[in-house]
Amino acid sequence: MPGKTIVSIAVFLALAGACLTDVPGQESAVRPRKVSSSPFAESENQIFRVVNQERGRHHFAGLSWNDELAAVARAYSERMARDGFFDHYDPEGRTAIDRAEKVRGWRFIGENLFVTESVPGLASFVLRGWLGSETHRTNLLDPQWTSTGVGVAEDGNGDIYITQLFTRK
């Protein structure tokens, strides 16, 4: 797609275990609005918070929540859970660039994925997993990212799929 570039893709498989106003369609640096009836909305919020806390520990600006990115991330986690695959490429060969095509205002995009069994303290567990992977850590702590969205879904076996998208203009 002309003008849009995928900067970094990171995959991690784990089995076992600044403030903007909340205007509809706008971004919020405080916390995600509950725009989803997803049973995992709170997990999405917690992952968003721990990622921004980690970025703050490294003196990087927090990411702004983007509802549109979150919807794309959630839909992709749901699709992986439903269709039984885990990859940055869907079965038709599409990437985050293709999935986020209709989201406005970005030029670069990155994606972190995670899958795990249900564990207590899911957000902290996911963060530790991403930080333990060089490519995930690089993506998560890239100071050039400005916006994010997180999506969480569960498959029929209880495995939890997490997608986090990062963008910048």
Image (spheres, rainbow, N blue to C red):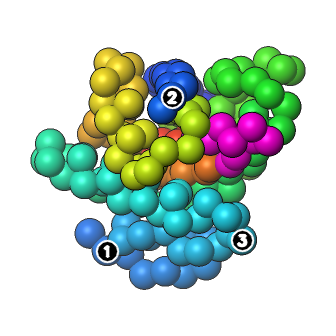
Identify the residue at image location x=47%, y=63%. 45
Near mark 1 (Cα within 10 A), the count class, few <14, some 14-19 or many ≥20, is few
Identified by mark 1, the residue type is Cys
Callout 3 touching callout 1 (CB < 8 Å): no
Residue at image mark 2: 16
Can residue 62 be seen in the rendering of this structure?
yes
Is residue 8 rendered to the left or right of residue 142? right
Give the alpha-carbon distance from disc 2 to disc 1, as whole Å.
Answer: 36 Å
Callout 2 touching callout 1 (CB < 8 Å): no
Identified by mark 3, the residue type is Ser
Q: Is residue 161 magenta?
A: yes
Name the disc covering residue 19, or none: 1
Q: Look at the numbered disc 1 and give the secondary structure of its residue.
A: loop
Callout 3 touching callout 2 (CB < 8 Å): no
Is residue 22 rendered to the left or right of residue 158? left
Q: Position of residue 155 (x, y in %)?
A: 75, 41
Name the disc covering residue 37, or none: 3
Q: Look at the numbered disc 3 and give the secondary structure of its residue.
A: loop
Predominant SS of the magenta segment: strand
Identify the magenta region: 153-162
Identify the residue at image location x=54%, y=81%. 23
